[in-house]
Image (cartoon, rainbow, N blue to C red):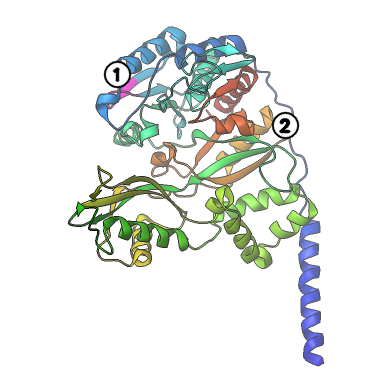
């Protein structure tokens, strides 16, 4: 009886502590202030400029012969036309053939502000689009076309902000760099070449700002307020190839365990044994930021990870999709190759596995585990394109605070939260030279708008673009 009473007392104490922690987990006092400076934005001009730039078909490809260099050249010429003062006052360097780097000299020394975007886009055809995919049509209050969100829009926001500030006679206190890659969509060399160029010039970037999260609603259970999700790290993106060789031959006399069978078994084994689940520090920081604004039940869980973390990991993992991707390394078989004919046994069967490497793991640890799970010496595993997860940027401090304050200047009601970017961006290359690399697109995007990137009907509301221009002006004034 004594042991039972002690256990009941312990359970009661744990419950009481958890409830108290949830009750005390409240939003911080509102310390926001009205911005001292009004910002004027010509939304129609910004929309027209984005429209014109969308019409340049800057489609990148891993096959150099599939890249139309004339479109990239036309895009760069158009930038000079649209932003004459920027091109007069800033120093422009074309790096590695197509990547663009602009330097706006500051009044004094200091770690520069770097504003990033990429001007290449993924392929598109008009099938399924409401407006032609490279039309740049301004229709129904939106700018339509490939790149309208990902990411010619943020490039336009940066240029619009710089051009406007130059007209106002503003001079930054420190250097401001505009860094625009030309092959982000293919994991190319544009952004790495810019980083190498800056490093060779002795430039040590301060705050680095690229695409990433956005202002979103209804994405986290129990949180009704709009969220400004700021990427502070990103998972690694690695392509691996599984291959099995065999003698081939006629399909009328198949072997018992041929190449295709072994490959299929390997894939099934990988699917059946997912990587272990864990929440990295940046994800725990996200929970801490969201907890005060969540409903009581969700707040009870998030404010007491010491108690509920195993439960949350099971729920996230079982949910699949984005929640599962938040808490572990994921694998997706994206390409399969076998025999060229229906009645021929494959001499070699191949599969490409796209792996998103979680924070805290590495390509090497992923390869080791995949080999153990496959457990077949006849299956060769080869890394095609390695990509390590990025370091986690600072989760507090002057630069993160400056970014958060700028976001709240433009979107006063949002909750600013860090998170781990599940996809890949060019920002990962700057993470090797700066501890404050942040990924945020300053637009409020609906679920449909977020889903349109790399899909059909990509379109950005003109009002959202105007908010983005305002954001960049305020960020340059605050940090630059």
Q: Residue at x 48, y 13 (%)?
A: 135
Task: Give the camera-side residue of 405 and 259.
Answer: 259
- Look at the image and give the residue range highlighted in magenta: 93-99
| Mark 1: secondary structure | helix
Q: Quadrant of the N terminus?
A: bottom right
Residue 29 position, x and y percent, is 78, 44
Tell me the distance, in whole angstroms, between the alpha carbons under discs 2 and 1. Answer: 42 Å
The disc, 2 or 1, on the residue closer to the chain's N-terminal end is: 1
Residue 157 position, x and y percent, is 53, 21
Judge left or right: residue 464 versus residue 6. Answer: left
Would residue 390 be visible to someone looking at this image? no
Q: Is residue 125 magenta?
A: no
Residue count near mark 2 (Cα–Cα under 10 Å), binned few <14, some 14–19, many ≥20:
some
Judge left or right: residue 102 versus residue 127. Answer: left
In this rendering, the answer to whether 322 lies above or below 451 is: below
| Residue 412, numbered label | 2
Judge left or right: residue 272 versus residue 266. Answer: right
> Would you name the residue on which mark 1 appears?
69
């Amino acid at each position: 009886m004594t042991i039972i009473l002690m256990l009941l007392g312990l359970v009661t104490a744990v419950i009481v502590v958890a409830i108290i922690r949830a009750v005390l987990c409240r939003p911080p006092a509102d310390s926001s202030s009205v911005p001292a400076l009004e910002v004027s934005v010509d939304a129609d001009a910004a929309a027209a400029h984005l429209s014109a730039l969308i019409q340049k078909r800057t489609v990148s490809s891993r096959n150099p012969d599939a890249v139309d260099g004339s479109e990239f050249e036309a895009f760069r010429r158009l930038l000079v036309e649209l932003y004459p003062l920027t091109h007069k006052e800033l120093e422009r360097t074309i790096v590695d053939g197509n990547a663009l780097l602009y330097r706006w000299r500051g009044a004094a020394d200091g770690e520069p502000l770097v504003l990033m975007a990429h001007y290449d886009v993924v392929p598109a055809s008009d099938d399924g689009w409401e407006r032609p995919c490279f039309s740049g049509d301004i229709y129904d209050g939106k700018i339509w076309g490939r790149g309208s969100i990902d990411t010619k829009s943020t490039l336009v926001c940066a240029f619009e902000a710089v051009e406007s500030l130059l007209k106002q006679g503003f001079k930054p206190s420190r250097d401001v760099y505009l860094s625009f890659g030309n092959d982000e969509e293919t994991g190319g060399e544009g952004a790495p070449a810019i980083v190498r160029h800056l490093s060779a010039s002795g430039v040590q970037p301060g705050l680095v700002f690229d695409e990433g999260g956005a202002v979103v609603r209804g994405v986290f259970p129990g949180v009704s307020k709009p969220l400004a999700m700021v990427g502070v790290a990103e998972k690694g993106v690695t392509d691996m190839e599984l291959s099995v060789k065999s003698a081939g031959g006629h399909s009328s006399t198949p072997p018992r365990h041929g190449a295709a069978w072994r490959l299929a078994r390997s894939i099934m084994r990988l699917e059946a044994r997912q990587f272990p689940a864990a929440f990295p520090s940046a994800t725990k920081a996200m929970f801490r930021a969201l907890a005060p604004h969540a409903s009581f039940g969700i707040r009870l869980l998030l404010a007491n990870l010491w108690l509920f973390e195993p439960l949350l990991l099971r729920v996230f993992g079982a949910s699949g999709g984005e929640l599962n991707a938040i808490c572990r390394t994921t694998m997706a078989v994206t390409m399969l190759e076998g025999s060229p004919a229906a009645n021929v046994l494959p001499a070699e069967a191949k599969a490409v596995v796209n792996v998103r490497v979680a924070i805290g793991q590495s390509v090497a640890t992923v390869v080791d585990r995949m080999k153990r799970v496959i457990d077949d010496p006849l299956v060769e595993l080869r890394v095609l394109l390695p990509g390590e997860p990025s370091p986690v940027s600072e989760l507090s401090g002057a630069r993160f605070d400056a970014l958060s304050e700028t976001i709240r200047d433009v979107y006063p009601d949002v909750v600013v939260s860090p998170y781990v970017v599940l996809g890949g961006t060019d920002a990962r290359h700057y993470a090797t030279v700066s501890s404050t690399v942040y990924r945020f697109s300053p637009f409020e995007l609906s679920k449909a708008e977020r889903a349109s990137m790399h899909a059909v009907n990509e379109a950005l509301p003109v009002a959202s673009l105007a908010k983005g221009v305002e954001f960049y002006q305020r960020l340059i004034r605050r940090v630059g």
